[in-house]
Image (cartoon, rainbow, N blue to C red):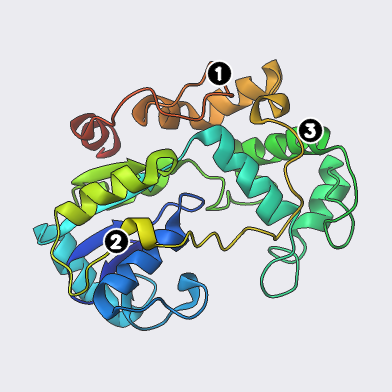
Amino acid sequence: MGFPGTWMTESESVVYRVVPKCACSTIGQIMYFSDHGVFFDGDIHDSTSGLHKWAQEASQPLIEANAKAHRSYAFTCVRNPYTRILSSFFDKICGIQRNGRRYRGNLVPMLVQKYGIEVGGDDGRDEFDQIRSFRRFLLFARDTIRWKKPMEPDIHWSAMSGHVSTFIVNGGRYDHILFTEDFNRGMQVVLDHIETPHHVDLTAIPRFNESEGHGPKRAHPVEAYFDDLSMHLMWEIYKRDFQLFRYDFDNPANKMPKGEVDLDEVHAKLGD
């Protein structure tokens, strides 16, 4: 299986396991800048050079050798499951993607037909009942994760622990797991532990939120989207994410983690 979703700087200063919807665009650009002194011109997910990625065949033996020998500092980044799935809904389901089309072609029409979801019209700009549509999307997300129907779960709403685990199961070990909600502090820990060809000043780094503007703005506070049934579904889907990464399941309004991640616990529980 190797190391899917893993990126590494060309200088091999650092190894990063991507978790979708968890500041991955910003992290990728920081890694690119740390090697080249400039940012990648465009969405870092589109780069095919300047950064080793598991999806690039020539990078695979380099990433695998590094990760298995733990030659470089390795990290990943996680996010509150409540805000992560909301972000997935507004970006991937309601939004028009950077290619000018809907995400995954016929996915949204199928959701409109089978789950009664509204997405704000053809361009995502019309008024619609965001809360009702999101809750119906959450049922769909649960169906994909629990039963793989009507499709396989998408990387943007499959559990973070699943993404994080592949790196461990295939022989890697994390040195740090940072929180999207406390990004600068967590990313500084990474930078303090590595030597990079170019100095990175986090206070001067822009946020590369490539999904921003794709879809409608969230009209309500996070907690408004989650009633008792929604929270029950969230626990069914993301129980391990809440527990391992210390997020507050009982209070959707609290986006901050309740404590630091226990790396030994993560490796023990996700290394099976």
Q: Nearer the viewer's eye, disc 2 or disc 3?
A: 2
The residue that disc 2 covers is 201
* Amino acid on which disc 2 is placed: Asp
Q: Residue furthest front?
A: 204
Q: Is residue 166 visible?
A: yes
Label 2: state its secondary structure. loop
Q: Separation of disc 2 and disc 3 at Cα?
A: 39 Å
Q: Name the residue rendered at 65%, 31% in the picture.
A: 222
Question: Position of 151 compared to 179: left or right?
Answer: right
Label 3: state its secondary structure. helix
Residue 2, located in which quarter of the rendered image?
bottom left
Label 1: state its secondary structure. loop
Residue 22 place in picture, x, y as percent: 46, 49
The residue that disc 1 covers is 251
Q: Quadrant of the C terminus?
A: top left
The residue that disc 3 covers is 131
- Label of residue 194 in the image: none
Pointer 1 local density, CA inside 10 Å: few below 14, some 14–19, many at least 20: few
Residue 28 place in picture, x, y as percent: 38, 65
Give above or below for 48 relative to 81.
below
Q: Separation of disc 1 and disc 3 at Cα?
A: 17 Å
